[in-house]
Each structure stands twice: as structure tokens, then as C-alpha cells.
Image: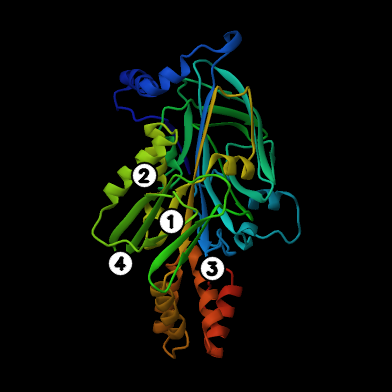
């Protein structure tokens, strides 16, 4: 059920709703100074900011491996549009309920959102091309979706009080609204849809600039194969709830990280990451919204690298066309590379072995443990199969990976 809400917190006193909401919708001093600069020919001055994540999994040689990033439960509200609904609407006789779940890719493009800041109501058109990928989810409705997404023309409505769709269940989707960006109104076949941003996701097969490999000496080797400099690299590990991270500048094309020592906190890492995001052009509220969106996922169990993808690389992966041309366009896409550790392999291998148990309870517990690895289970299983000399283990892994969603085998 979609409930009707205002886009900012409000009191229960009806008289105070409009005053409080208008006050909270006012841009910060930083944003106001950006928007109040004079525009050519008396036109509205448009500022556009974007953030998002490119997630990949490093193979043993450090380069990205293929996986099925959409093979799992959705973390998005039901009102978000997906490629599955367009497949069903197309009338294909064999369209599945979740065609996107079977998509294999090197990179999951997660939650890019485009924010708009202007001092007056403005007509804007936006198209994002994705030549080496496919858009899988988006909101509001778009005019065209496939190897890119085109929203056509829509309204940017500064200071407007609009109703934003919301469901009762919590979702990673909603924190992105906690900014001062102007709402947008998109009209189309589905009627009128409002949001505080343009949202889209997808999967693709393209090269990211960093390779990340864990070596036998427990060091992580990072190489920059791109043409552009990468300023800051963050190595993070959560091992059984114990947190450690290291931050350094990538001054060389290749360098080594020691695995982090546990004893640090998520709060200190969030402060450091927030500063990095702001340094690259995001407003404070945008940086905080991004961190709040991905807090559970970025800092879950595992070893991973974070870095800001160079702007030239982002523009080549996701060419964007905006009319009128923004006075400022900031694009901050974070590269997230997952590293499969020996500890993870060992733990998964133990669970795979238990799937051969004669006890249904043991098999069920093992499957539950495997599913906790979520979308990262399959790459780990494939690596184990490649190393295993056991025909039984290989057969079980083949059945698991062919099932698509790691369905129980009993």
C-alpha cells in the first residue's frame, strides 16, 4: 500500500505544516550561493548533482568476475518501475516474473540519483545512455528504457509541497530524499509521478579502472589501469563484527595494502567517507543521504575497496544529456570492489559439504547460511568448484548455481 506523505518531517499541528515544510525545503547556504549566481539571458540557473555506486567482485587475478547481481530479494519499494514489468507488458509468452534475476554482468550500477537545484520552476529533459549495460529499475516513469533511459521533459518545482509515494516497509530507497533538491514532476501514461530525484539502476559489462587482488601474504594489491588519477582509496573489512579500514592516496599505478587491523568504528569511517564525497562536489546532505542509503550494505561482513570513479570514466560509461545545460554538473560514482577472502571460501565450503548430510535439519541450516551471502554466494561457489578435487562438491555447486536463487535441494 502506498501512503500519502509530505516530503519533509511535519508536526501534528495542521496550521504549522506549511510553515515548517517551507522552512525545511530552503536550500543550505552552500546551495543558495550556487543557485543565486546570475544566469545568462535571465534564464533559471540549473545545478545538477548525481551520486551512485558501481559494484563488482574481484576474481583471483584482481579483475572483475561475472555474477548475477539481481539474484536476490529486492530492496526497492513496489512503486519503482522495473524491467520485469515491461517484459510482462510486452506480451512475451514466456516472460518470467523476474527476468532480471538471471542477468549476468561484471558490474551492478546501484542507485544513481540525479538531484536538481534551481530558483524557479523549470522544464528539463534528461537522457542517460548506457552503451555497455541495461537499465533494470527506475523512478519516476520514463519515456524510453533499454540501453539507457530517457525521461523526456519534466518539471523541476523548487519550494513545492508535493506528495511522495511511500510504503510501510523500510527500504534503502527513502534516505536519498533527505536533501534540499527541488522535487520533480513527470507526467505520462501512468499519470503524474513526483519524486525528489531521478532514480535508476542497471547492470553492465564494462571495465572499471581498478583491479584488486588478495595475495598469499595477506596483502591487497591495487592497480589502476585507467588513464585518469584516482585520488583516494579506502580498504574496509568487517570480520565477524570487528571493523578495520585504511585510507590512502593512489599516487602510483600499483601499490599494496596490508589488511586492516580491527579496532575502528563505522562512525569514524562514515565521517571520513563523508569528507571524501564532499571534497568531490556533493553537498553535505547529499553525502549523508548516500551513506545512509548504503550503510547496511557497504559495511556488512566482508573485505572491500571503495574509491571515487574518475569523472571521465563515469561520463564514458554513462553519457548524460541534460537540457537546458546545467551551470554545474557534479557526478560522484563510487567504485565498490568486493574481495573474496580465504575465510569466506572456507566457511562456504563447509556449508556445501553439509548439504550432503543425511539430516534434513543440517541441510536446511547449511542452505540458510549460504543464502546469507546473498548475491555474492555464486562467485564464491564457483571459485570453490574451480579449486575442489571432489566430484561431489562440484556436483552440489553446479546444482546450486544452476538453480538461480540457491533454492533448497531437498
Q: Looking at the image, do the residues carrying marks 2 and 1 touch, with CB atoms under 8 Å apart?
A: no
Indicate the secondary structure of the residue bearing disc 1.
strand
Q: What residue did someone put label 2 on?
A: 273
In terms of depth relative to the viewer, which is nearer, 126 or 177?
A: 126
Number of residues whose C-alpha sits closer than 10 Å to that of mark 2, classed few (under 14), some (14–19) or many (20 or more): some
Q: Earlier in the sequence, mark 2 or mark 1?
A: 2
Indicate the secondary structure of the residue bearing disc 4.
loop
Q: Earlier in the sequence, mark 2 or mark 4?
A: 4
| Distance in Å between CA atoms under marks 2 and 4 | 22 Å
Q: Is residue 281 left or right of residue 398?
A: left
Q: Can you give x and y, in whole percent of width and height, for residue 74 in the image?
A: 51, 55
Q: Earlier in the sequence, mark 4 or mark 3?
A: 3
| Distance in Å between CA atoms under marks 3 and 1 | 15 Å
In terms of depth relative to the viewer, which is nearer, 336 or 352?
A: 336
In terms of depth relative to the viewer, which is nearer, 194 or 156?
A: 156
Residue at point 23%, 59% (across, down):
263
| Distance in Å between CA atoms under marks 1 and 4 | 18 Å
Residue at point 55%, 13% (across, down):
39
Q: Earlier in the sequence, mark 3 or mark 1?
A: 3
Name the mark nearer the viewer: 3 or 1.
3
Q: What residue did someone put label 3 on?
A: 61
Q: What residue did someone put label 1 on?
A: 305
Q: Taking the image as drawn, is residue 161 in sight?
A: yes
Q: Can you give x and y, in whole percent of width and height, for residue 8 in the image?
A: 38, 29
Residue 240 badge: 4
Number of residues whose C-alpha sits closer than 10 Å to that of mark 1, classed few (under 14), some (14–19) or many (20 or more): many
Q: Taking the image as drawn, is residue 97 in sight?
A: no
Amino acid at each position: 500500500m502506498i501512503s500519502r506523505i509530505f516530503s519533509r518531517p511535519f508536526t501534528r499541528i495542521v496550521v504549522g505544516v506549511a510553515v515548517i515544510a517551507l522552512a525545511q525545503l530552503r536550500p543550505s547556504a552552500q546551495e543558495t550561493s550556487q543557485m543565486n549566481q546570475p544566469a545568462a539571458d535571465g534564464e533559471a540557473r540549473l545545478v545538477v548533482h548525481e551520486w551512485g555506486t558501481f559494484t563488482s567482485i574481484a576474481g583471483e587475478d584482481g579483475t572483475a568476475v561475472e555474477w548475477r547481481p539481481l539474484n536476490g530479494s529486492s530492496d526497492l519499494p513496489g512503486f519503482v518501475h522495473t524491467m520485469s514489468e515491461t517484459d510482462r507488458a510486452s506480451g512475451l509468452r514466456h516472460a518470467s516474473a523476474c527476468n532480471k534475476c538471471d542477468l549476468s554482468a561484471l558490474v551492478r550500477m546501484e542507485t544513481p540519483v540525479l538531484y536538481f537545484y534551481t530558483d524557479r520552476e523549470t522544464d528539463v529533459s534528461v537522457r542517460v545512455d548506457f552503451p555497455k549495460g541495461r537499465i533494470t529499475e527506475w523512478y519516476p516513469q520514463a519515456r524510453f528504457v533499454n540501453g539507457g533511459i530517457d525521461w523526456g521533459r519534466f518539471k523541476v518545482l523548487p519550494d513545492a509541497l508535493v506528495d511522495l509515494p511511500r510504503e510501510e516497509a523500510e527500504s534503502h530507497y527513502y534516505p536519498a530524499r533527505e536533501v534540499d533538491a527541488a522535487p520533480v514532476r513527470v507526467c505520462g501514461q501512468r499519470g503524474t509521478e513526483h519524486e525528489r530525484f531521478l532514480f535508476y539502476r542497471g547492470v553492465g559489462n564494462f571495465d572499471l579502472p581498478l583491479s584488486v587482488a588478495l595475495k598469499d601474504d595477506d596483502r591487497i594489491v591495487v592497480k589502476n589501469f585507467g588513464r585518469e588519477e584516482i585520488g583516494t582509496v579506502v580498504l574496509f573489512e568487517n570480520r565477524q563484527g570487528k571493523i578495520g579500514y585504511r585510507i590512502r592516496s593512489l599516487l602510483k599505478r600499483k601499490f599494496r595494502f596490508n589488511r586492516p587491523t580491527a579496532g575502528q568504528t563505522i562512525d569514524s569511517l562514515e565521517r571520513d567517507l563523508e569528507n571524501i564525497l564532499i571534497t568531490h562536489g556533493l553537498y553535505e546532505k547529499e553525502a549523508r543521504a548516500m551513506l545512509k542509503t548504503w550503510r547496511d550494505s557497504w559495511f556488512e561482513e566482508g573485505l572491500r575497496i571503495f574509491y571515487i570513479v574518475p569523472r571521465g570514466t563515469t561520463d564514458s560509461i554513462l553519457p548524460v544529456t541534460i537540457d537546458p545545460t546545467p551551470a554545474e554538473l557534479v557526478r560522484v560514482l563510487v567504485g565498490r570492489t568486493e574481495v573474496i577472502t580465504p575465510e569466506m571460501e572456507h566457511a562456504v565450503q563447509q556449508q556445501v559439504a553439509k548439504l550432503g548430510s543425511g539430516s534434513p535439519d543440517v541441510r536446511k541450516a547449511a542452505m540458510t547460511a549460504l543464502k546469507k551471502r546473498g548475491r555474492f554466494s555464486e562467485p564464491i561457489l564457483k571459485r570453490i568448484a574451480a579449486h575442489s578435487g571432489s566430484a561431489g562438491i562440484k556436483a552440489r555447486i553446479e546444482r546450486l548455481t544452476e538453480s538461480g536463487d540457491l533454492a533448497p535441494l531437498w
